[in-house]
Image (tube, rainbow, N blue to C red):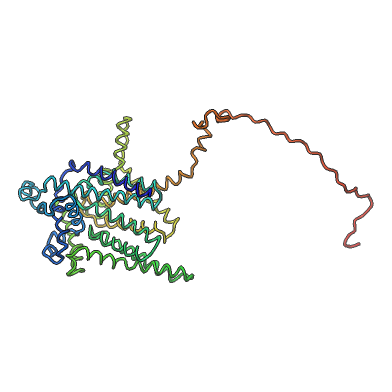
Amino acid sequence: MVDVVLAALMFTLSFNLNVDKVDVTPFHPDESRWLNRSFYIEELLDPFGETWQDYYLTRGQPPLGSYMMGIGQLVQDRPLRPNIAWDFFFDRERGWNETAGAMPSAEDLRAGRRTSGFVGALVVAAVYLLGRLLTNRIGGLAGAFFLAYHPLHIHIGSQALSDQLLNLLLTLTFLAAFRFAGRPTWGWAIALGVLFGLGGAAKLSPLLLSLPAAVLGLYFLVASSVLERARRRTGLKRIGLKLMVQPAIAFVAFVVAYPYLWVAPLQHTYNLFKFRVDEMEAQGLVNDRNRVENSWIALDRIGNRIGEQWQTSAGPVSALNERYDLTLDPFGLDPMLAMIGLVLFGVLVLRHGIRSSHTFVLLLVLAESCAIVLGLRSDLYRYQLPLVLVETICISVLAGVAWRALATFDAFKWLRGYVVLPSEAGKVGADPLHEPIEPPVTRKRMARARSAVPPRQEGVQSPSWTS
């Protein structure tokens, strides 16, 4: 019950922070496109209709973000077709798009942004629960606070975009993975696979996380064949089989959520991934400043984005500089803390073992990070948001492990050696510098007891083995 209350408080905090920026965050043309596709939720009633044919916008983005926008519009009593899609060919002529009706009204834009802020707040609540499972409540609270105040999280949480939905599904996937590893039932296995598929229906990359899960399952199957104890061998085989089928469960959920795939699942899935790769390459060609040629450059761009431009620690450090006239530089502080947390995460994996929940979650976290770094070919700020989630999880582990270490340290016992605590003031012997001198302990000399056996007479010999 305590965890539910704390998660609700974290949700409330984050939602207020996001909504507070709704009216001041600059407009991005992609918001027009996501609001335009709100009617996809309505078109689910006609899965073979014109909307789901092989059109540019249909294969341009998986549909789950559009469903999210549509539900948000319906809940807030806004139209499902608020505007036409923004045409980037006329992007330099903003007046053309506004005249054509691509610019959403202030009310529709505000409604879409509130939807994104609501989902972003759900991410913060889910992060608390994940940190709580990985370490303790302090770790969960630290992660939730860090993400709630992260400037990139707030910025995207106050725009009508679908990126917050990706982070929500990733966090729920990590939670399901933790539960599955602790209790590997078919129920949790199916839930995990469905979340892989729904994540793919939001932004494609989570669909690929089912592959390392299957590789881990293959490892368990191979390991089970060399174990001598039949009971452990059977348990590993069951876990291995449930992990091996994760790609199949994920793909089925992915196809079911996306009517465009129904007529030709494999071919249209290939079209989707090819389109996203080509689109990202095109974004780099259109704006050479955003172009990312290889993974080393991707790492450098990521470091600049979340290590300099967008940092939670920048706020407190700026406040300290202003309050105490300091010149502290917060550059790279967030990534540094996250790296320490990642090392401690690895320590937890070594402590709990390869079959533990911590191992499975760390595997998925690293796999998602690698997918983003390897696939990043255009340096748009939105693409960094999942890495902010990874950073948050590592910092949550750092805080939880640090608190656990400090909890075993008796600070009051340590302080008693140097200061007088208020609760002990006035007591005899409270002053550590003036301990009462105890009188020396004197021991009385004990009289030696005399033996009752008479002394042996001289000349009397004891019998021997030879006598």
Report the number of discs.
Answer: 0
The residue at 35%/52% (across/down) is: 130
Residue at 27% across, 59% down: 206
Residue at 38 percent across and 64 percent down: it is: 184
Q: Is residue 139 above or below residue 271?
A: above
* Up-down relation of residue 440 to residue 38 (above or below): above
Q: Residue furthest right?
A: 459
Position of 152 with respect to 464 (left or right) is left
Residue 62 placed where, x, y %?
19, 59
Name the residue nearer the viewer: 208 or 429. 429
Q: Is residue 142 visible?
A: yes
Residue 88 in sight: no
Quadrant of the frame with the C terminus = bottom right
Q: Position of residue 183 (x, y in %)?
A: 40, 62
In the drawing, does residue 325 fall left or right of residue 350? Answer: left
Residue 238 pos. (x, y %): 39, 69
In the displayed structure image, the side of residue 129 where residue 273 appears, left or right: left
> Residue 250's x, y, as percent?
28, 64
